[in-house]
């Protein structure tokens, strides 16, 4: 991909509302970068690779040269404004607040603001951008206090970029379920991004894990540590003759009332339909598990940034196993 460049322009009217894509006016020069933007809601066709102004870090921010990002359900749902609530957040008739998608990223810090203490230029990092988005670009600015940590040393940028959202979501909900050693945990939708991380995390916490997934993903979840598996194409998991301490719906497709009869008296039902609140400390915890070879990222496919439309089309089919990574820059 072409790196950032300079154009002789007097004014820069940035096309992105994600972050401080400020104009660097130095003898009428503005520094640009490549980014995938969308200016209307719709199919993957609305995503276009364009030149936009390169962001400038504020005093408490770091500037990251992005090496990789990912495509998550949250990205394509924001693109389509599905559910409609997305329009209330990002503009009723067209995207206004966010025009560069990308929930998570991995890259190298290129510049730091004067107040930044914990990072320096050259640090390899991975980060959860949250509702700020911005991963589909060559650069992004994040606050030092954001959910950002040094990249696991035993992962490539493409692997690391797929970790934050899925792992932090899984961790948040398992903790909400009061996970503890010796429990029995059922994970519904165990082959997706959140599910594959949830299986591994639940095993790390010392639980017996039962997974629910399709026939084609049975071997995958077993390889991640699942003790028992239920093929939902062949049997109804609600007919299981066992009680669980935690039932975690990792895809948001079950109902608490249906799962309730499988819970122990003090058992808990948690679902990704709720809200997760990841922290910087959580991401550091995840990093440590990865470096201890207790957690990994399952990557289904990898696309280049200029093929982002096809990446979105694939993820939107609900067929991906684990994660889909997007290569932004060569390592």
Image: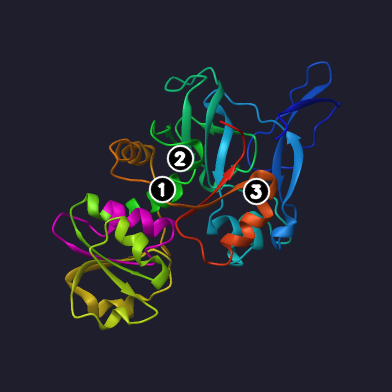
Foreground residue, 304 or 110?
A: 304
Rendering coords of residue 271 (x, y %):
37, 65
Give the image's coloring scheme.
Answer: rainbow
- Which residue lies at the image location 39% right of the left edge and 74% below the top edge? 254
Rendering coords of residue 127 (x, y %):
47, 38
| Contact, mark 3 vs mark 2 (Cβ under 8 Å) | no
Please rate how many residues cluster around mark 1, counting C-alpha atoms within 10 Å: few if below 14, some from 14 to 19, many from 20: many
Name the N-terminal-most of marks 3 and 2.
Answer: 3
Question: How far, Cα to Cα, is label 2 from label 1?
Answer: 8 Å
Q: Is residue 187 above or below residue 168?
A: below
Q: Name the image quarter holding the N terminus.
A: top right
- Label 2 secondary element: helix
Name the N-terminal-most of marks 2 and 1.
Answer: 2
Q: Is residue 159 above or below residue 217?
A: above
Rendering coords of residue 85 (x, y %):
58, 64
Q: Give the residue number, with chain letter if any, for mark 1.
A: 297
Residue 197 in the magenta stretch? The answer is yes
Taking the image as drawn, is residue 173 in sight? no
Q: Is residue 92 above or below residue 293?
A: below
| Among the 4 quarters of the image, the one containing residue 317 | bottom right
Q: Give the residue number, with chain letter if any, for mark 2.
A: 160
């Amino acid at each position: 991909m072409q790196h950032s460049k300079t154009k002789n322009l007097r004014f820069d009217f940035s096309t992105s509302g994600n972050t401080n894509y400020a104009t660097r006016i130095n003898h009428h020069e503005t520094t640009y970068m490549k980014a995938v933007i969308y200016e209307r809601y719709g199919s993957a066709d609305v995503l276009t690779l364009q030149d936009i102004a390169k962001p400038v870090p504020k005093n408490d921010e770091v500037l990251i040269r992005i090496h990789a990002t990912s495509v998550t359900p949250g990205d394509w749902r924001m693109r389509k404004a599905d559910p409609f609530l997305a329009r209330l957040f990002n503009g009723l008739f067209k995207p206004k607040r966010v025009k560069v998608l990308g929930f998570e990223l991995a890259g190298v810090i290129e510049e730091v603001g004067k107040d930044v203490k914990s990072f320096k230029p050259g640090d390899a990092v991975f980060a959860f951008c949250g509702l700020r988005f911005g991963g589909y670009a060559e650069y992004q600015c994040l606050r030092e206090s954001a959910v950002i940590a040094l990249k696991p040393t035993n992962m490539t940028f493409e692997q690391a970029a797929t970790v934050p959202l899925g792992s932090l979501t899984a961790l948040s909900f398992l903790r909400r379920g009061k996970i503890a050693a010796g429990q029995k945990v059922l994970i519904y939708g165990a082959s997706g991004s959140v599910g594959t991380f949830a299986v591994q995390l639940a095993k790390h916490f010392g639980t017996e894990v039962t997974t629910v997934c399709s026939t084609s993903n049975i071997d995958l979840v077993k390889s991640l540590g699942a003790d028992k598996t239920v093929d939902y194409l062949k049997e109804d998991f609600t007919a299981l003759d066992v009680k669980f301490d935690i039932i975690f719906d990792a895809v948001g497709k079950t109902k608490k009332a249906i799962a309730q009869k499988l819970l122990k008296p003090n058992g808990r039902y948690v679902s990704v339909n709720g809200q997760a609140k990841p922290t910087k400390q959580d991401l550091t915890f995840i990093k440590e598990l990865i470096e201890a070879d207790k957690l990994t990222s399952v990557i289904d496919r990898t696309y280049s940034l200029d093929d982002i439309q096809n990446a979105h089309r694939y993820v939107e089919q609900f067929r991906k196993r684990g994660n889909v990574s997007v290569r932004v820059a060569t390592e």
